[in-house]
């Protein structure tokens, strides 16, 4: 049996009974596969620095940072930014509200609209998570130059920008 091990250089075969590396060249052109491989160390570091210490999942972290960074953000805006369906977003907001880290408030201007706001506890967790994200990113991207980091970010943003059409 051969299984893949993620390394800084890419995926490397782990020797099993056949003792030869797994040929992954047929997937080299598949961007989604490459992104999935890169996501493995990213998630591992996220849970080490933010997920386990602050009990946050990546989508919760992203949502809370967006709420902190955008006054009067609405549920609809959050759903669009995070590509979440209305039912899934509602479940996520319910969970975070039960945890006491955010609150939903009806807009004074349009009673149909609900604004999402962080509570003081949510503000504290979000601040701590953002602080933890700095060393997390440094560790994950330590082998890239500043120019390579900027290029990677720019290219990923360009790909993501076109996800909606």
Image (tube, rainbow, N blue to C red):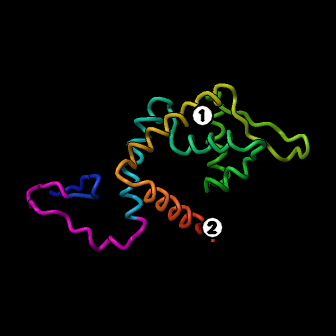
On the image, the x and y values in percent for residue 133 come to: 49, 39
Which secondary structure is most common in the magenta stretch?
loop
Residue receiving disc 1: 126
> What element does badge 1 sit on?
helix
Q: Which of 66 and 92 is in front in this view?
A: 66
When asked about the image quadrant of residue 136, the answer is top left
Total count of labels = 2
Q: Nearer the viewer, residue 103 or 65?
A: 65
Q: Residues within 10 Å of mark 2 (few under 14, many from 20)?
A: few
On the image, the x and y values in percent for residue 132 come to: 49, 34
Q: Does the magenta stretch include residue 164?
A: no
- In the rendered image, the vertical position of residue 97 relative to residue 73, given as above or below: above
Q: Is residue 23 magenta?
A: yes
Q: Which of 1 and 117 is in front in this view?
A: 117
Magenta highlight range: 13-32
Q: Is residue 121 left or right of residue 157?
A: right
The span from disc 1 to disc 2 (Cα, nearest Å) is 28 Å
Q: In this view, does 14 lie to the left or right of 24?
A: left
User: Which quadrant, please, contains the C terminus?
Assistant: bottom right
Residue receiving disc 2: 164
- In the rendered image, the vertical position of residue 155 relative to residue 62, given as above or below: below
């Amino acid at each position: 049996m051969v299984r893949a091990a993620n390394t800084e250089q890419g995926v490397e075969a782990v020797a099993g009974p056949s003792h030869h590396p797994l040929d992954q060249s047929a997937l080299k052109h598949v961007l989604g596969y490459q992104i999935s491989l890169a996501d493995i160390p990213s998630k591992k570091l996220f849970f080490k620095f933010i997920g386990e210490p602050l009990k946050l999942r990546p989508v919760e972290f992203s949502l809370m940072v967006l709420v902190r960074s955008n006054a009067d953000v609405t549920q609809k805006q959050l759903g669009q930014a995070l590509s979440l369906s209305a039912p899934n977003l509602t479940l996520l907001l319910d969970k975070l509200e039960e945890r006491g880290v955010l609150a939903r408030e009806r807009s004074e201007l349009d009673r149909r609209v609900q604004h999402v706001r962080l509570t003081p506890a949510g503000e504290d967790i979000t601040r701590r998570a953002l602080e933890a994200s700095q060393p997390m990113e440094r560790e994950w991207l330590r082998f890239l130059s500043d120019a390579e980091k900027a290029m990677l970010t720019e290219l990923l943003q360009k790909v993501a920008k076109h996800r909606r059409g």
